[in-house]
Amino acid sequence: LPPEILDRVIDFLHDDLDALKQCSLVTRSFVPRTRTHLFVHINFESDDDLDAW
């Protein structure tokens, strides 16, 4: 399949974190696209966590 189609499939899964995690393990070529959805929000529990990051 063309990469554009695969990107659309991954984009369709944007709200299914478990599916995105599984997709990221299928092939390295999926990793960048899945990361855009998996890491769109980063939560820190405390200021210390933020400082450590």
Image: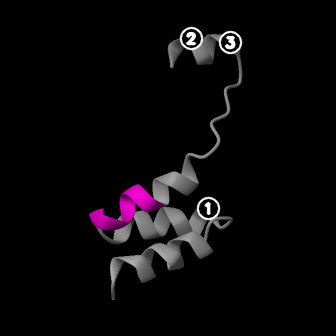
Residue type at the position of mark 1: Leu
Relative image position of residue 25 (x, y in whole percent): 37, 65
Secondary structure, mark 2, is: helix
Image point (68%, 12%), residue name: 47
First in sequence, mark 2 or 1: give its number.
1
According to the picture, the residue beneath numbered tag 3 turns out to be 47
Image point (35%, 77%), residue name: 3
Q: Main secondary structure of the magenta part?
A: helix
Marks 2 and 1 close (CB-CB < 8 Å):
no
29 within the magenta span: yes
25 within the magenta span: no
Image point (39%, 56%), residue name: 32
Query: How much space separates mark 3 and mark 1, taking CA atoms?
Result: 26 Å
Q: Nearer the viewer, residue 31 or 3?
A: 3
Q: Dot 2: within a 10 Å radius of its alpha carbon, few (fewer than 14), some, or many (20 or more) residues?
A: few
- Residue 25 vs 50, above or below: the answer is below
Q: Tell me where the magenta segment starts and ends, as one range.
A: 28-33
First in sequence, mark 3 or 1: give its number.
1
According to the picture, the residue beneath numbered tag 1 turns out to be 17
Marks 2 and 3 close (CB-CB < 8 Å):
yes
